[in-house]
Image (spheres, helix red, strand yellow):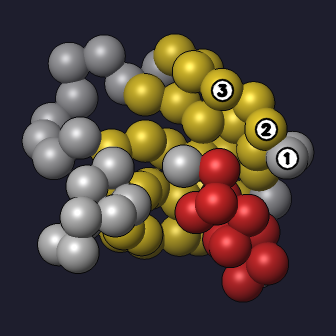
Amino acid sequence: MVTVRRARGLRIVIVANDHSPAHVHIFGDGHAKINLLGAAGAPELVWAEGMTRSVLRRAMAVV
């Protein structure tokens, strides 16, 4: 895993040679996976574990 950004108490990472679609993993108070290009053309939450709604909103804003 490569950390590509740290912002607002979160760590955004990518995994080299990971599967499609293009996505990032977010670590902070929990872990989430966010597709970079969702069905509506914007980032889209795939799943989250151990994150509150406020942390998820912060993660989506950072991506």
At horizontal 87% and vertical 45% (from top left) the residue drawn is 9
Q: Point out the residue furthest to the left here.
A: 20
Provide residue 62's location: percent of width, then percent of height.
65, 50
> Helix or strand or loop: what does disc 1 sit on?
loop
- Mark 3, residue position: 5
Q: Residues within 10 Å of mark 1 (few under 14, many from 20)?
A: few
Provide residue 31's location: percent of width, then percent of height.
61, 56
At horizontal 33% and vertical 49% (from top left) the residue drawn is 36
Q: CA distance from mark 1 to mark 2?
A: 4 Å
Indicate the quadrant where residue 58 lies: bottom right
Q: Is residue 51 left or right of residue 47?
A: right
- Mark 1, residue position: 8
Indicate the quadrant where residue 24 lies: top left
Is residue 39 shown above or below 24? below
Q: Point out the residue furthest to the front here.
A: 41
**Badges 2 and 3: C-beta atoms under 8 Å apart?**
yes
